[in-house]
Amino acid sequence: MPRPRRRLASTCIGTVTAGLLATGASLAEPDEDRYPGSDVAMGAYLDFGPPGVARIPHLSNWLGGKEIRVGHTYLPGDRWAGIEGNVGFLEDWARWRKAGDDRLFVLNVPMQERNEGRVPDRQVARLIRAGAEGQFDRHFRRLAERLVALGVPDTVIVLGWEMNGITYTHRCAPDPENWKVYWKRIVTAMRSVPGQEFKFDFAPNRGKDAIGWTECYPGDDVVDIIGMDSYDQGPGRTFDEQISQPYGLQRQVDFAAAHGKAISYPEWGLFRRGDNPEYVRRMLRWIEQHKPLYHTITDYCPHGVWQCKQNPRSTAVFREALSLPEPGPVVPTPVVPTPVVPTPVVPTPVVPTPVVPTPVVPTPVVPTPSVPSPAVPTPAVPTPAPTPQVPTPQVPTPQVPTPAVPTPEVPTPEVPTPPAAPTPQVPTPAPSQAPTPEVPRPSPVTPAPVTPAPVTPSPLVPTPEVPLPVTPSPLVPTPEVPEPTPTPTPVPSPAVPAPQSPAPSGTPAPTPTPPAPTPVPLPEPAKPPLNSKEWCVPLNFGEWLSKLVGKQSVCVKIDLGEGSGFWPF
């Protein structure tokens, strides 16, 4: 037998557990009555015309932004013109429907004119038979054409609603068999219009009323949806009785399942029992459980919960159940600063450029032969001082020009200067510095060549091979190239006074040669050898060095031998 303490502990544990379960059940109950995320299309009848369209967004705001996907209205049944759709408000509903792909436009269509005219059963039976014979088909064909033209060919047609009651002229009880035939003719006429996609909703009153609604069912081939209008009234004192009564809510669900049809609730709301929040709560729970294609509450007094203010408790239940939850406080996302990772600066290794010593190339001093002109004798150019050492002289590749060959047997006073040995740039002295002396004209027959005085090179600069000047021969056309000698042969200076050339800066000025009073004739030059050829290469020392030393050139003579007959170029 357990000890009392253990029994007490067990009792306490059981009591706490039961309390927790009860508390959990009570806390979970409100969540069961909330259906804001339901995928069932919801709407409300707010007005038949443009005001009904205009009120839809306000109802949505009242429900916290819940989407109203169903627009519901009725065609007037007083004249055939209204049943044919010759009413302006259809255009407003068509625009609303086309504004959203997931919207439904539900249109209640009467089957007879004077539909609420309290027509007696005998006359109703006569009208039903006329319809079964096809006398009213044209009216419904015109309605179908009107809806297709408005761009709403998929309208849900609630045809002859509440046909099991006693209110409307399109009621079924006076002649159920012909009524079913009449329904078939209407559906066939409307489906014959090109472009239509209509769905036909068979929607009786809940309960038996004047006749059991199953006796009026026209057939699966002409019905797409099995609906039901269900208000808070008898038969059935409670909602459970509304479910279980003959031809009640359960019967509708079972009948639709047996025929493979969807269900709907085109009309529902409060009525005989006034403000009844339990009815609203249970009806919404039933809808959420059985997932009809759509449902629309009739929202005007005494049935409504939004526009009608006389049902505040039911209004609170409806709004709480269907409103979207209010958004909670917006929690700002914490801004996590991105750590700034410094980019490591990798020093670029400085590779020292190796200093390559530039070899000092000595500047060869090449004397330029000065040939006197018959008019103006060429002054002798004094040899400049030794060339200063330049760190990096530019030594271009020597280009061998084509030597100029003098014309034989034509004595001419003017001897052209060979193009390979241009005269260095010697600044011309001003008249005030060096007056030009008068020089006697040389003999026109045998001009005396002037050989420049040799210049002793600097000991640091190797002596280049300087060829002897070429003098024209009057008899032999081909010059002979003598063997190059290491040092030039000194030749007496011409007896022509030459002006002093200013010495470059930084070098001692050369001693000027005193002019001779009379020219001394030189001995006749030797006959040049045969097959001689001379190449002169100009030397370029750069702009600033050329200004110091003038333009220089190196000439080379090659003797191929007399009578060889070989001319290399």
Image: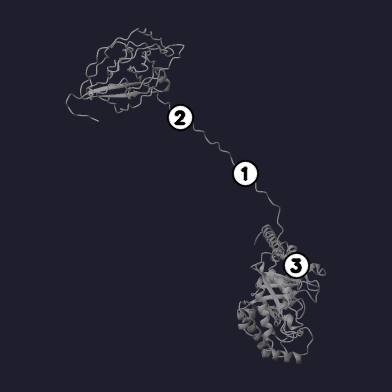
Residue 201 appears in the picture as rendered: no
* Viewer-proximal residue among 18 and 259: 259
The kind of residue on which mark 1 rests is: Val
Q: Which is nearer the N-term, disc 3 or disc 2?
A: 3
The kind of residue on which mark 2 rests is: Pro
Task: Find the distance from the CA under tag 3 to the CA under tag 2.
Answer: 78 Å
Give the image location of residue 196, x and y in percent: 62, 77
* Viewer-proximal residue among 265 and 437: 437
Task: Find the distance from the CA under tag 1 to the CA under tag 2.
Answer: 38 Å
The answer to whether mark 3 and mark 1 are in CB contact below 8 A is: no
Give the image location of residue 35, x and y in percent: 69, 66
Of badges 3 and 1, nearer the viewer stands 3
* Residue in view at x 62 percent, y 80 percent: 193
* Residue in view at x 45 percent, y 29 percent: 349
Element under label 2? loop
Element under label 1? loop
Q: Residue furthest left?
A: 563
Q: Relative to residue 412, is residue 563 drawn left or right?
A: left
Which label belongs to residue 54? 3
Residue at numbered disc 1 = 336
Q: Relative to residue 527, is residue 81 drawn left or right?
A: right
Above or below for 94 versus 121? above
Rendered image quadrant of residue 411: top left
Task: Find the distance from the CA under tag 3 to the CA under tag 1.
Answer: 47 Å
* Residue in view at x 26 percent, y 15 percent: 486
Residue at numbered disc 2 = 349
Report the label total: 3
Rendered image quadrant of residue 43: bottom right
